[in-house]
Amino acid sequence: MADKIRVLLTEEEVNARINEIAHEISRDYEGKSLHLICILKGGVFFTCELAKRLTVPVSLDFMSVSSYGSGTVSSGVVKIIKDLDEPLEGKEVLIVEDIIDSGRTLAYLMEILKQRNPKSIQLCTLLDKPERRVKKQVQVTYTCFTIPDEFVVGYGLDYDQKYRNLPYIGVVEQ
Ligand code: IMP
Ligand code: MG
């Protein structure tokens, strides 16, 4: 049976907010080049939309980590499935994530990526669920939306690999 999905953020709201964040990032990095790291798979839609709107020179790389199994509860285990293709040495790095929940994934990633000597490393996320944070040290520089503690799908986010392609963000009603 098809799940019922309640719209939390419309496509128009998401796109308008990405425009604002892209403007802010372009201003902050003016005169510099930006190396975007897309965290697969969830970050891919947001990364593309963001990258298209940036006015500074951009390069892209991709990384895949596992944080969850097939359910909706964090396993607490983070594993690199696909590492970056390029070194980070001397680069202005911006990590682009779909959502920060417990913060376990990003706390771990930031630690290992900082060891690769980027010139700077910041974090940009489409969604943040601060109520769920376990790793309080995770610093997010750019957040599109802060949302309540609900399991969301769309715009890259999945429920058992479904709904990533929804152009809006919704809550799966049980
Ligand atoms: P964290 O390590 O708990 O911060 O988990 C981050 C990852 O969990 C995200 O990159 C998502 O893949 C997944 N996740 C967390 N909350 C949600 C949600 O509400 N919907 C879909 N995926 C989620
Ligand atoms: Mg993810």
Image: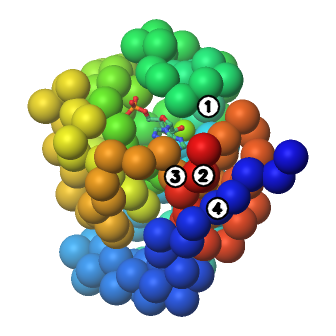
* Image vertical order of residue 120 relative to residue 83, above or below: below
- How far is mark 4 from mark 3, CA to CA? 9 Å
| Cα separation between marks 3 and 1 | 20 Å
- The secondary element bearing badge 3 is classed as strand
Asked where in the image residue 103 lies, by quadrant, the reply is: top left
How busy is the neighbourhood of tag 4: few (under 14 within 10 Å), some, or many (20 plus)? some
Residue in the foreground of this view, choosing between 132 and 63: 132
Indicate which label's residue lies in the foreground, 1 or 4.
Answer: 4
Identify residue for label 1: 64
Residue 69 locus on image (x, y percent): 62, 19
> Separation of disc 3 and disc 2 at Cα?
7 Å
Q: Quadrant of residue 115?
A: top left
Query: Which residue is located at x 58 percent, y 81 percent?
Result: 11
Instruction: Name the residue rendered at 54%, 89% in the picture.
Output: 12
Q: Provide the residue designation for mark 2.
A: 172
Q: Quadrant of residue 161?
A: top right
Q: Kindly check if marks 1 and 2 are in contact, taking CB atoms under 8 A apart as contact.
A: no
**Secondary element type, mark 4:** strand
First along the sequence among labels 3 and 1: 1
